[in-house]
Image: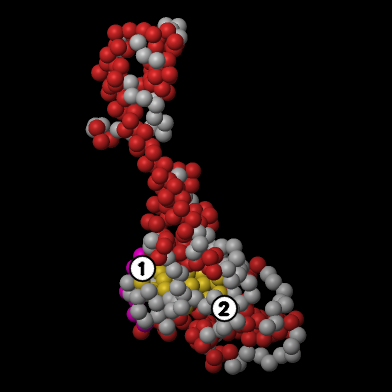
């Protein structure tokens, strides 16, 4: 049931004078003639018809001439004035929201965020701002500072160091992670057990992302994929919030060795470096590869292929064809996915020229 407070305000306020003007047209009464009939100046009447003056003062006279009830005209005038005020306030709110969005845009890319979140910007700035604040848990724009000093973050060293775009992706990553729940309880003592299950998934390379997400959840860790944004060549990210770790990767490359390494790298950070809520660190300077990043790399490499196993890998000439042939054979003998082995070779030696095949894609 509609109440007085549920009255919708139109986007355009219509003055009661418009009704009178229509009635005049129907009766073929000119403004000059009608002004004479009301005993007022033509300019006065013109202002009333346009809504520039209140019709209430001559409502009784209009009722006498046209038969439109004065109380109706007075009521319409009150509604018109109310609508004008609300529309004016709405316009001010739109301007304020637009300004605040521009302030946020200094810290992260609004256009990319709106697009990724599926926000219909045609609904106005107030609507857009409200959804962005809610979905991304944004602080006040004036106080928003993306401080990554204490974050653990894996970023490509080659390209993509635009701070705003990195910040944009991080906000989207946190939004995706916060929508998730982990079924189990996180326990650092069970990471070794989790690692064993993850490595098996990577080597099997079947329904990898869904299986990793499920097993991570069982061990109290949120895991998801958030595609990269322009000018932010990020591979993975992790953070701790309310005691629950989250790992997000971009899957920039649809390759099992990349996904395995990036995932285990972030798991290394979770185990070794995330100790308090809101712990996170983003290393934007790709040339400064910190000791913590090296520790996470070491964890990933030794978890995916134990050092004791890697020590038995074949010694071959530095020839890409021979390396691929012999290491693929060795991988098969050890029950390790050949591209995880070849990926390790590429990482350790810098030799990346191997003949690709479909088996490298993430299953």
Magenta stretch in the rendered image: 181-188
Along the line of sight, the residue nearer the viewer: 130 or 313: 130
For label 1, the SS is: loop
Relative to 254, is 338 above or below?
A: below
Neighbour tally class for label 2: few under 14, some 14-19, many 20 plus, Cα within 10 Å: few
Quarter of the image with the C terminus in it: bottom right
Image point 30% across, 12% down: which residue? 61
Give coordinates of residue 209: x percent, y percent. Answer: 50, 67
25 relative to 258 in the view: left or right: left
Neighbour tally class for label 1: few under 14, some 14-19, many 20 plus, Cα within 10 Å: many
Along the line of sight, the residue nearer the viewer: 347 or 142: 142
Image point 34% across, 68% down: which residue? 183
Relative to 15, is 126 above or below?
A: below
68 part of magenta stretch: no
Q: Main secondary structure of the magenta part?
A: loop
Instruction: Say the numbered circle drawn on residue 182.
Output: 1
Image point 49% across, 43% down: which residue? 122
Reading the image, the residue beneath label 2 is 285
183 part of magenta stretch: yes
For label 2, the SS is: loop
Q: Is residue 204 visible?
A: no
Give coordinates of residue 280: x percent, y percent. Answer: 43, 76
> In the rendered view, how is the structure colored?
secondary structure
Along the line of sight, the residue nearer the viewer: 155 or 94: 94
Quarter of the image with the N terminus in it: top left
Query: Which of the marked residues, 2 or 1, is nearer the chain's N terminus?
Result: 1
Along the line of sight, the residue nearer the viewer: 299 or 104: 104
For residue 334, what is the image quadrant?
A: bottom right
Image point 39% across, 25% down: which residue? 51
Give coordinates of residue 5: x percent, y percent. Answer: 25, 36
How far apart are the alpha carbons under marks 2 and 1? 32 Å
């Amino acid at each position: 049931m509609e109440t007085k407070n549920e009255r919708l305000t139109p986007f355009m306020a219509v003055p009661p004078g418009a009704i009178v003007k229509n009635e005049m047209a129907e009766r073929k009464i000119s403004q000059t003639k009608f002004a004479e009939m009301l005993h007022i100046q033509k300019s006065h009447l013109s202002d009333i018809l346009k809504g520039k003056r209140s019709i209430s003062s001559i409502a009784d006279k209009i009722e006498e001439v046209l038969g439109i009830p004065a109380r109706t005209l007075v009521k319409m005038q009150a509604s018109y004035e109310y609508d004008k005020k609300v529309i004016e306030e709405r316009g001010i709110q739109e301007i304020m929201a637009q300004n605040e969005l521009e302030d946020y845009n200094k810290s992260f890319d609004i256009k990319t965020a709106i697009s990724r979140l599926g926000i219909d910007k045609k609904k106005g700035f107030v609507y857009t701002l409200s959804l962005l604040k809610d979905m991304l848990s944004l602080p006040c724009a004036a106080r928003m500072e993306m401080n990554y000093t204490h974050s653990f973050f894996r970023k490509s060293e080659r390209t993509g160091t635009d701070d705003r775009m990195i910040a944009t992706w991080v906000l989207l990553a946190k939004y995706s992670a916060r929508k998730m729940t982990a079924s189990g309880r996180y326990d650092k003592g069970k990471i070794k057990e989790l690692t064993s299950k993850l490595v098996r998934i990577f080597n099997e390379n079947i329904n990898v992302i869904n299986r990793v997400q499920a097993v991570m959840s069982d061990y109290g860790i949120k895991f998801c994929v958030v595609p990269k944004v322009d000018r932010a060549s990020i591979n993975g990210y992790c953070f701790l919030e309310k005691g629950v770790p989250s790992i997000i990767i971009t899957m920039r490359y649809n390759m099992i060795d990349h996904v395995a390494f990036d995932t285990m790298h972030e798991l290394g950070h979770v185990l070794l470096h995330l100790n308090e809520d809101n712990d996170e660190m983003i290393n934007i300077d790709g040339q400064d590869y910190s000791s913590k990043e090296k520790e996470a790399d070491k964890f990933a490499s030794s978890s995916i292929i134990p050092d004791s196993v890697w020590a038995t890998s074949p010694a071959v000439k530095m020839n890409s064809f021979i390396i691929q042939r012999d290491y693929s054979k060795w991988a098969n003998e050890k029950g390790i996915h050949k591209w995880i082995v070849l990926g390790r070779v590429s990482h350790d030696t810098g030799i990346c020229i191997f003949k690709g095949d479909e088996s490298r894609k993430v299953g």
